Amino acid sequence: MNEQLGQWLTSPAMIRAAVVIGGVVLIITIVRLLQRAASGRLESVDARYRVRKLIALFGWIAAFLLVVGVFSGRFSQVTVALGVAGAGIAFALQEVIGSFAGWLAITFGDFYGPGDRVQLGGIKGDVIDIGVLRTTLMECGDWVNADLYNGRIVRVANSFVFKEPVFNYSADFPFLWDEITVPVRYGSDHARARQLIQDTLSEVVGDYAEFAKQSWREMVRKYRIEAASVEPTVTLIATDNWLQFTARYVVDYKLRRSTKDRIFTRLLEAVAATNGAVELASATVELSKAPVVDVRVRPA
């Protein structure tokens, strides 16, 4: 019994298995040490994330090469079988291969990175992890209004970047244009109303517009795009019911809802301070005269 156990333990298969296990443990240890060293030396969160992912990838590659190298003698005996099966495996794993290719495109093509707000196939959210096969999003919107988190974690295959457009809200231009409409009653001082709205925009988003100018100048140098204005603007049209002012401004892509709240709150305070010189309008139905209804009942 002991002789059989000794022969089994010293068999070539067991020796190869022991080498593989020992090598994998060593690779895992080295990968974790390198990741820990990278986390301590790099200050940028994005750089730390990318370096840790690359180290992990090299670890997987090293483990794969170790297994192939140890069992190469046996693999050589089934070369033909592997070649025949290769086409079938590639077809069966085409989505996996496409996702891996998508990961390479995301990593080196600057599609998006951790922390970016993106929209993939109608799913909008913040990127919280980029794996070799899937991108993980913290979803925004859906049953929650504006751009707030709804609590769902969504995983999207990386192959998606080759199939449909990728919308990035925070890449080279980390803000958005947004606008609100303000209805003002006819008879109000329209010039004063325009000035109130303009002053409110300057107060709430004026400083951010200065930051946006610098980012837009970088966009103009990098891409073939016109030098658009990022200053807050107010335009007016006259409708059948009221004077409609449209306020357009740039805003941080994560602060659209809170910025609107600040603008409307400040604007209501400013309108109330005019003592009726400027009044906001609303859709109302006024019944000026009720028609006379003559009901006659004929006797039976």
Image (cartoon, helix red, strand yellow):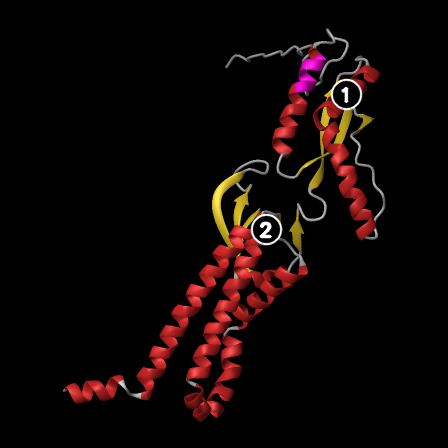
Q: How many marks?
A: 2
Decide which of 223, 235 is in the foreground and name it: 223
Q: Residue at x 66, y 22 (%)?
A: 264
Secondary structure that dominates the magenta span = helix
User: In the image, which disc is placed on residue 199?
Assistant: 1
In this rendering, is residue 160 above or below 265? below
Which quadrant of the rendered structure holds the N terminus? bottom left
User: In the image, which disc is placed on residue 46?
Assistant: 2
In this rendering, is residue 146 above or below 125? above
Query: Which residues make up the magenta segment?
Result: 266-271
Q: Residue at x 81, y 43 (%)?
A: 217
Please identify the quarter of the rendering in which residue 174 is found: top right
In this rendering, is residue 233 above or below 143? above
Decide which of 28, 293 is in the foreground and name it: 28
The answer to whether residue 249 is seen in the rendering is no
Q: Indicate whether residue 118 is drawn in magenta.
A: no
Amino acid, disc 2: Asp
Q: Residue at x 31, y 83 (%)?
A: 14
Q: Residue at x 55, y 37 (%)?
A: 148
Decide which of 157, 72 is in the foreground and name it: 72
Cα gap from disc 1 to disc 2, whole angstroms = 38 Å
Amino acid, disc 1: Asp
276 relative to 157 in the view: left or right: right
* Image coords of residue 196 (percent x, y): 77, 18
* Image coords of residue 7 (percent x, y): 23, 89
> Is disc 2 surrounded by few (<14), some (14 to 19) or many (20+) residues within 10 Å?
few
Return the disc, 1 or 2, that comes first in the chain's sequence. Answer: 2
Residue most extreme to the top: 275
